[in-house]
Image (cartoon, coloured by chain):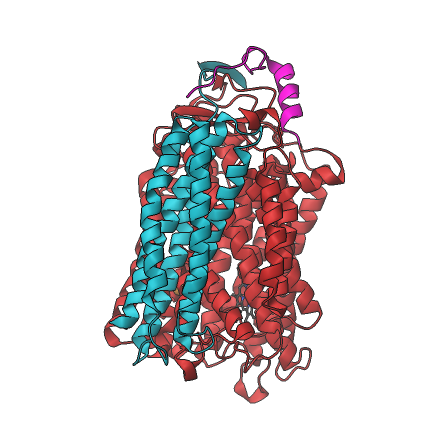
Chain colours: A cyan, B red
Amino acid sequence: MRQTIVRDVSDLPTYGYGPRSGPWWGAMGFMALEGMGFAVAIGAYLYLYAVNPSWPIGASPPDLWPGTVETVIYVLSIIPNEFTNRAAHRQDLAKVRIGLIVMALIGIALLVLRGFEFAHLNTRWDNSAYGSIVWLILGLHTTHLATDLGDTVVLAVLMFTRHAKPRRFSDVTDNVFYWNFVVLAWLPLYVLLDWVPRL
Amino acid sequence: MSIAAEPNDLRDDVLNGLQLSTQLERVWRTPSGWMGALMAVDHKVVGRRYIVTAFVFLLLGGILAVLMRVQLAGPEKTFLSADKYNQVFTMHGSTMMFLFAVPVMEAFAVYLVPLMVGTRNIAFPRLNAFSYWMFLFGGCFLWISFLFNVGPDVGWFSYVPLSSLQFTPTKRADVWAQMITFTEVAALAVAVEIVVTVFKLRAPGMTLDRIPLFVWAMLVTAFLVMFAMPSIMVASTSLILDRLVNTRFYDSSSGGHPLLWQHLFWFFGHPEVYIIFIPGTGMVSAILATFARRPVIGYPVVILSLIATGFLSFGLWVHHMFVTGLPQLGAALFTASSMLIAVPSGLQIFCWLATLWDGRPVYRTPLLFVIGFIVIFVLGGLSGVMVASVPIDTQVHDTYFVVAHFHYVLIGGAVFPLIGAVYYWFPKIAGRMLSERLGRWNFWLAFIGFNVAFFPMHILGLIGMPRRVYTYTADMDWAHLNLLSSGGALIFALSFALLLVNVIYSLRKGELAGDNPWDASTLEWATSSPPPPQNFDRIPVVKHRDPLWADSESLPVVAGLSAERREVLLTSLAEAEPQIREASPEPSIWPLLAAIATTIFFIGSIFTPWAVLWGTPPMAVTLIGWFWPTGSKEDEE
Ligand code: HEM
Ligand SMILES: [Cu+2]
């Protein structure tokens, strides 16, 4: 077939931010399906809650402090996260490095707290269906936390190597975006795990 | 934000014709040799593998079907023992659903969608390669287990408590659950790729209302996958946890509930039927337009009914559980919604019939299969509306009536369009036509064989033959119909043998296809057959819903993409306005290594929970390897 050139795209940039870029939509897609995973797990929790006359089954509700401290940190972490986001948009390497390190430290702190939270659930996974679903949900969220932490650490390291090129800033903003998802997913889980058993 | 092009960057506007093709081919080709094959990220290479692998699983599942029909051909046969029979029907159902029907549809999407939207590769090509490997390893895992007599034997939906440790102390149920995890990971990955490909990689000018119907169908399917499959992942994970570390999800003595399993399974399982069926409708629309020689009538109606079907399919799962004793109102609601979903499907059928009516149909093999689809699907839909009502469902639940119904829907709704699609797109993929004469034989054997095999099952069900029985006694009077059904199954199997012969013969001796042998209208036919590694020498610009019919002489294109490294054009979501020239990943061995690490993790965790600990670091290492920049030019801007 004969080709007629009707348009020239040489002036277009080679990377972009947000919904203009491909990876952002990829992150969006994975958040959608992971969000669905959380929704299904929450549904399973509520189903078991509904069919069981007593809840929590044979245990006292989880101790409040680990989950609550975590929640506070999650909400506050939005601030350095947004700081990193802006620095990445401005392609300010020094500030992005700081932001990523701070976020990595926050991730580590949350992971440690998560350990305490498991220890203070006051039930084991094999005690009852209640214990099982609580461990499953918390485990699911911990996987997300750990994955994002891993990504943050790798990006932080990258930013100290010769690979710290402009397009990496777009990756940083996607990482920021994903962290917001981890935070957002946590909030209903906090209510569900720590407060529903106290109803 | 924009980075000025370096002056020495070779662009496709300074090259022309053969020079441009060879240059792009060098940049985009898959490296040769074994290593190259393992590193492939070209969507056509991966798509072809995906298609072939899925058809191998069809063959395996089909062989099991024939074994079952041999066993059931007469009363009290001893060809298969009861235990073997349990494994065989479970393997048949699981293979067909998880290793054939869903993957084969996604496989066609992987091959065709990037071509149809006019781009050079799928979004996230390495994820695509990873997905294929996961699918392959999951399928092999299931089948190797079966050969070692640990094939699952608890039915394709693996109900608890049967599948719990107490009643299935062997590893058989774990194999089933973990096979699910493999295939769902693979399917979810492809779904995300398809969504992003359709959203961001469309050729400039391909606005939402110019997207080919097949692509729309695959987009809706991808969303169904994304929202349905997490449910089965939660289900299979919780099942395996119950079996492995004594969680109590399904243990009713500790607050667990067996019905939770059914909810989780069917919340996925019902949309699953549409995940198989909606791509089939996309194939039908593509084939119909080409052979009726006119665009499908009611393009917006078809799209809206696809979307409506997608939404409704999430409101139906409970109809698989009518006999579990639901509240009256719930049952009525789900009956209504189950009947409601017939409406959008019906609308689509009217659009297709009108298209045929108004067109000048050319009755080539692909169209024959489409017409066969319409006939069978209407019948299957009828029995579907019947079982959607609680009283009838209660009567025929777990009988051969249901077996007949879902084979009419699955084979009529998906396999017939699929075989039509094979005849239709084979010339594009292989560069040669399939034999038309064998094709006609193939169609008539399939159509007659299918009906003879499955129609009698309706009657068998009504006169009381339950499903999943390995034999029956002579005094039941089921023998004649069963023999008839087995005969039909043999004819049906023969039709697939003929397809195989046709493919092998035509690969060598088939007539050369040329770019556009059917004079079709969509972009995949605007490039050579098979397409070069870069798909198109220049990215097309779309000005019409049926670009190749609007102008069959010349193709408007864009220039200015790199000719010395892999670059694709990103466009805006609705208007498809060019936005970014984005780098597209090079071939890489890491997706395979990541899949191997994940496989070790998944299979290891059947045997010990500690696999979660020692299995994670290798996965992390391979993922870092995957994403770590290689220092090549496109990575470093
Ligand atoms: C060669 C054509 C086929 C034949 C002769 C055939 C035959 C059968 C038979 C006799 C059963 C019932 C087993 C029993 O309940 O005892 C069955 C079950 C089933 N078939 Fe097929 N089948 C064929 C193709 C397919 C295809 C293409 C699909 C899906 C796309 C499929 C999906 C299923 C499923 C899901 C079950 C249920 C398995 C279970 O009960 O766990 N079949 N098939
Ligand atoms: Cu259903």
Viewed as shown, does residue B604 lie left or right of B366?
right
Residue B313: percent from left, percent from top: 36, 57
Residue B43 makes an appearance in the image: yes
Vertical placement of residue B454 versus A182, above or below: below
> Which is more toward the observer, B266 or B34?
B34
| Viewport quadrant of the N terminus of chain A | top right
**Residue B2 covered by magenta stretch:** yes
**Residue A150 covered by magenta stretch:** no
> Which is more toward the observer, B516 or A42?
A42
Residue at the farthest bottom position: B475
| Viewport quadrant of the C terminus of chain A | bottom left
Find ligand 1 in the image and state its quadrant. Answer: bottom right
Residue B7: percent from left, percent from top: 55, 10
The residues colored magenta run B1-29
Viewed as shown, does residue B116 lie left or right of B623?
left
Viewed as shown, does residue B195 lie left or right of B335?
right
> Which is more toward the observer, B549 or A100?
A100
Instruction: Name which residue lies at 42% across and 78% down.
Output: A128
Examine the image and state in which quarter residue B268 appears: bottom left
Examine the image and state in which quarter residue B541 appears: top left
Viewed as shown, does residue B59 lie left or right of B389?
right
Residue B519 makes an appearance in the image: no
Residue B247: percent from left, percent from top: 48, 74
Residue A5: percent from left, percent from top: 48, 14
Instruction: Name which residue lies at 57% across and 56% down.
Output: B100
How many numbered callouts? 0
Residue at the farthest right position: B33
